[in-house]
Amino acid sequence: MLFFLVVGKGSFGTVKKGKWRNLDVAIKIIETEQEKNAFIVEVQQLSRVNHPNIVKLYGACTKTPVCLVMEYAEGGSLYNVLHCMKQVEYTLAHAISWLLQTANGVAYLHNMKPRALIHRDLKPPK
């Protein structure tokens, strides 16, 4: 696994762009003890998820550096697309498409069996 530049930093570690098995990946590096506790829960939850509108979990490293290896979403979050990229004219059709993609992903999570997943912190930066 190769690590490249930092593409994000949040309450749950640092995210770097990387290369794994010839794929561009997002590597979420777990840095604190609190993050390690959340890491275990996130691995358990994401390993159950398989939907085109939700980033895929490819794997997890439990030895240093503790990290999640996930699908890399080119362009980043919806927030980045709307506020950080070069100015592009977005239409009502774009907004409806983003809304439907988000709703489909959330509906998938809420209808999972045997137990639904609830995101609890859904917002454009994520």
Image (spheres, grey):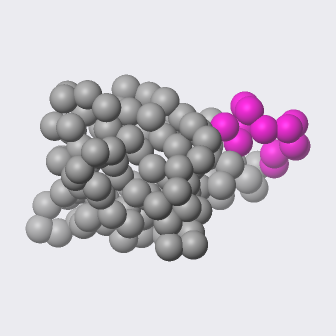
Q: Residue at x 52, y 56 (%)?
A: 2
Residue 46 position, x and y percent, is 29, 58
Q: Residue at x 41, y 44 (%)?
A: 28
Residue 11 position, x and y percent, is 37, 26
Residue 36 appears left or right of 12: left
Inspect this view and state whether residue 101 appears.
no
Q: Is residue 83 magenta?
A: yes
Inspect this view and state whether residue 49 appears.
yes
Front position in the image: 50 or 102:
50
| Magenta extent | 80-91
Residue 88 appears left or right of 121: right
Q: Residue at x 88, y 43 (%)?
A: 89
Query: Is residue 106 placed above or below 23 in the rendered structure?
Result: above
Residue 82 position, x and y percent, is 72, 37
Residue 100 position, x and y percent, is 56, 58
Asked where in the image residue 65 lies, by quadrant, the reply is top left
